[in-house]
Image: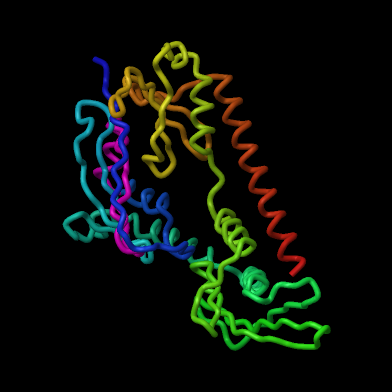
Amino acid sequence: MTRIYIITIYLAASTAVIHAQLDLLTIRESESLVEHVPAVADGIAQGGCPTLSPTYGDQDRLGVQVRFACGAKAGQLLSNYVVNRRTGALTSGLDEDLSHIVPETAAFAAALVARAIQRKLSPAESTCLALEAARGIPGWEGKAASITVEPFGKPTMRNREFTARRRSSDPPIECGRMLNVDTAQVRVRDDETGRYLMSAGLGSLVEKMIMLREPIGLSELDVIDIVGQLPSLTAKLLPGCLLSTGGVFRSDERQVGLLCGGSLTQVTSAVSVNIFSGRLKDLESGHYLASAEAAESSRLHLHQAEQRRSDLQRDVDALCAVK
């Protein structure tokens, strides 16, 4: 019997503005914690293709809805979970503490939290960010000016203070500001105005620092290209059909389906791709797929992702070395 796969995104977003928060578990890390719950792990082992969809509430808590995506239970809700992204605590949708049910996840959660804390900006990165922010202070522009930053006071667990100075010889003047770098949210506050500084250069640097903390993996277009190399699937890619992916539905997998006839939710063939290894699996049989063309495409895209990471690190190193 042909299985029907459901590729649908279930998302709920709050209206609150959520900034980058390096010391919190990422969405993928939170989902990997949910995958340790026995009911979810059993669903994975039994071929029910559980898919995870995040529900955004406050910054520290992430709701994760788990549904079966294939087999006889396709579309059915397995359960709802809530992950505390700061502590790694895991509860069910009914606020039931799951630590006694899955005690083995405690060490795993602790390791994830420790890794998250290590993602905060280093002293050198904080200095680099403070100087780029100072250069973007309105009115401080000008090639003849010299802008410097120096650490001030004792850093806290999350914040570092800097004294920023702008000096020029013609006319001979000096201006000063106190800047506060939030090493977890990657933001710089001007203590004189209470506002967080923004500029094109600062925004670019912040983006690069955040991206460097993301794991190296395949993008959605990479995944589509890899799956497009599978002869078993491309043979079914008739006129009017297309390959479709709607997101990462597991902590390490993206699903790609063959969508025909304009249906947005029902797909008759689907493949999962591990976004970190490029390994392919047929969701109907649960078997891993072997294809020389797809394997070569995976190798190439992962190599390109590593190269982009190296280029990004080189850009940041060069920029901060100048500072």
Q: Give the image quarter of residue 271.
A: top left
Is residue 43 magenta-colored?
A: yes
Q: Give the image quarter of residue 243.
A: top left
The image position of residue 301, as x and y in percent, is 60, 34
- For residue 42, side relative to residue 290 (left or right): left
- For residue 295, side relative to residue 102 (left or right): right
Q: Which residues are magenta?
A: 37-63
Q: Give the image quarter of residue 82.
A: bottom left
- For residue 59, side relative to residue 161 (left or right): left
**Quadrant holding the C terminus:** bottom right
Q: Nearer the viewer, residue 102 or 122?
A: 122
Instruction: Answer yes or no: is residue 320 visible.
Output: yes
The image position of residue 299, as x and y in percent, is 61, 31
The image position of residue 169, as x and y in percent, is 83, 84
Q: Nearer the viewer, residue 163 or 50?
A: 163
Is residue 31 magenta-colored?
A: no
The image position of residue 221, as x and y in percent, is 52, 33
Q: Is residue 17 above or below residue 188?
A: above
Name the residue at 51% across, 73% down. 196
Q: Nearer the viewer, residue 36 or 259?
A: 259
